[in-house]
Image (tube, rainbow, N blue to C red):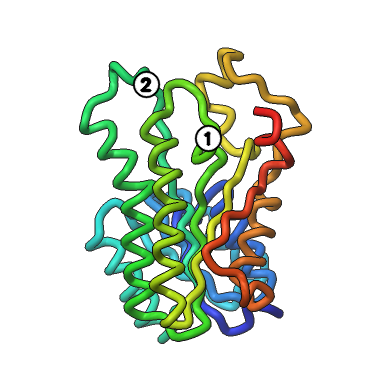
Amino acid sequence: MRFQDKVVIITGGAGGIGLATAQRLASEGARIVLADLNQANLDAATPEVHAAGAPDVLASLCNVADEAQVVATVQATLAKFGRLDVVVNNAGLMQFKALEELTGEDWLRVLSVDLLGAFYFTKQAFLHMKPGGAVVNVSSVHAIATEALVAPYAAAKAAVLSLTRSSAIEGAPKGLRINAVLPGAIDTPMLWNNPNVKSGVEKINPSDVGKPENVAAAIAFLASDDAKFVQGSELLVDGGRLDHL
């Protein structure tokens, strides 16, 4: 199994793509750390990840926008498992407002989760991972082609790609790999609660909607030694949706 004895932190790990990723990596032998903002979701997800095959699961209540909480999660991981091999920066926040209605606080709220959260965990990975470690950032097709009312989210996800490239350059001499996935329309609450989708402004063809497990499979590849020569990449996982947006 590709992740036998490896320790993986997954942010936003108690639902959606994060939980699917935790289950996929657990099925391949990983010890999983679920970092999530919602305690009830953590309580529900933990036994599911155990059932998927994880030898051990650590649930860590963590707001990724708070660097002190990120450090605490990593320290708890090291205290329990003695190592850190993979970080999946999946936690994300999306809000919907017209550009002229946005405030600085709105921008900072989204950027603090979607961009700085990824940076904080990547920083900790650089401080504590041994050579062979991997970071996978979850960006979005919105980094490339977007729509109205989501300017901070689109900007943050584009910045995550830039962070991925910079991290890959600095991580390579340390023996660390940093890559990104760009999900398209994925069957999660974030998609179906999108007011643009609800109103019909954004048309969703059912054939364009993927499953969290589809993204989890791509993340598993990038996090594994199968991708040992993949560095700074941006892997679309969108079923071809971006080709005709």
Quadrant location of the C terminus in the rendered image: top right
Element under label 1?
A: helix
Q: CA distance from mark 2 to mark 1?
A: 15 Å
Residue type beneath disc 2: Lys
User: Residue at 57% across / 14% down in the picture?
Assistant: 201
Camera-nearest residue between 30 and 131: 131
Asked whether residue 98 is in view, the answer is yes
User: Which residue is rendered at x = 64% and y = 48% of the image?
Assistant: 236
Q: What is the quadrant of residue 211 in the picture?
A: top right
In the image, which disc is placed on residue 97? 2
Image coordinates of residue 58 in percent, x first then y, are 45, 70
Residue at x 53% of width, y 38% of height: 144
How many marks can you see? Answer: 2
Q: Which mark is residue 190?
A: 1
Which image quarter: residue 169? bottom left
The quadrant the N terminus occupies is bottom right
Closer to the camera, 65 or 231?
231
- Mark yes or no: residue 48 visible: no
First in residue order: circle 2 vs circle 1: 2
- Where residue 123 sits: x, y (%)? 32, 68
Camera-nearest residue between 146 and 153:
146
Instruction: Give the amino acid type for the residue marked by disc 1 in the picture.
Output: Met
Q: Residue at x 61, y 14 (%)?
A: 200
Give residue 125's position: percent from left, percent from top. 39, 73
**Mark 2 touches mark 1? (CB < 8 Å):** no
Can you say whether 196 is above or below 86 in the image? above
Residue 124: x %, y % from top left: 33, 71
